[in-house]
Amino acid sequence: MEYHFTAYTLVDITDSKCNDPRGNSKFFLQTQNLSMLTQVLSLRSQLMTIKSTFTEQCNMDDYEFGSEYTGLHTVWKFVFSSEHQTTWLRGDSLFYHAIADTNTVPIYPNLNETANINKFFDSTSADKLNIYFKEVLIA
C-alpha cells in the first residue's frame, strides 16, 4: 500500500514551470506559490509523487473550505506522498503539523483565483479556510 496525501486549495498553485522572474510575472508567481507549499511541507519530510492540478467551476458544497466561500470556484489539488505516513501526525490528527506549518504562510494572490482569498494560506479558520488536507490510500 502506498499513502498519498492531497491538499485542496483556493490559492493558485499552478505548476507553470516558470522560474525566471523576468518573464511573465503571473507564471512566475504561480510557481512561487507552489514552491512555497512544497517547501513548507518538506520541512518535516522529503515529498515524493508531487503533482499539482486544478479544476474550474467547482461547487463549494463539495469541498471543505471556509464558510465564506460559496458558489463555484477554481480549486487546486496538490497530490504528494512521503516515506512515512505519520510525518504530520500529532495525537489523533494526521495533518496536525501540515495544518500548523502552512497556516499564515504568505502567498501571491490575484493570479487565477476565483475566490477572494487572504494573502496567505489559511488552514485553521472556519470562515476563510483556503487550504485543507486529505489522505488517499492507493492499493
Image: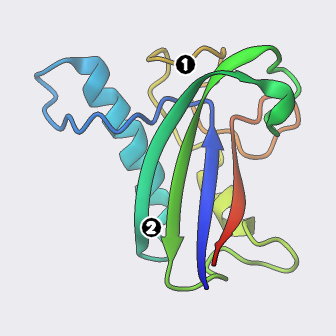
Tell me the quadrant of the picture where the N terminus can be found.
bottom right
Side of 65 relative to 116 (left or right): right
Residue 19 x %, y %: 17, 38
Q: Is residue 124 visible?
A: yes
Residue type at tag 1: Glu
Mark number displayed over residue 66:
none
* Residue bearing mark 1: 113
Mark 2 or mark 1, earlier in chain: 2
- Find the distance from the CA under tag 2 to the CA under tag 1: 24 Å
* Residue bearing mark 2: 42
* 124 or 111, nearer to the observer: 111
* 10 or 137, nearer to the observer: 137
Tag 1: Cα neighbours inside 10 Å, few (<14), some, or many (≥20)? some
Residue 21 x %, y %: 16, 28
Tell me the quadrant of the picture where the C terminus can be found.
bottom right
Residue at 54%, 19% in the rendered image: 113
Residue at 72%, 66% in the rendered image: 95
Residue 135 x %, y %: 70, 65
Q: Give residue 96's quadrant in the image.
A: bottom right
Q: Nearer the viewer, mark 2 or mark 1?
A: 1
Side of 124 relative to 121 (left or right): right
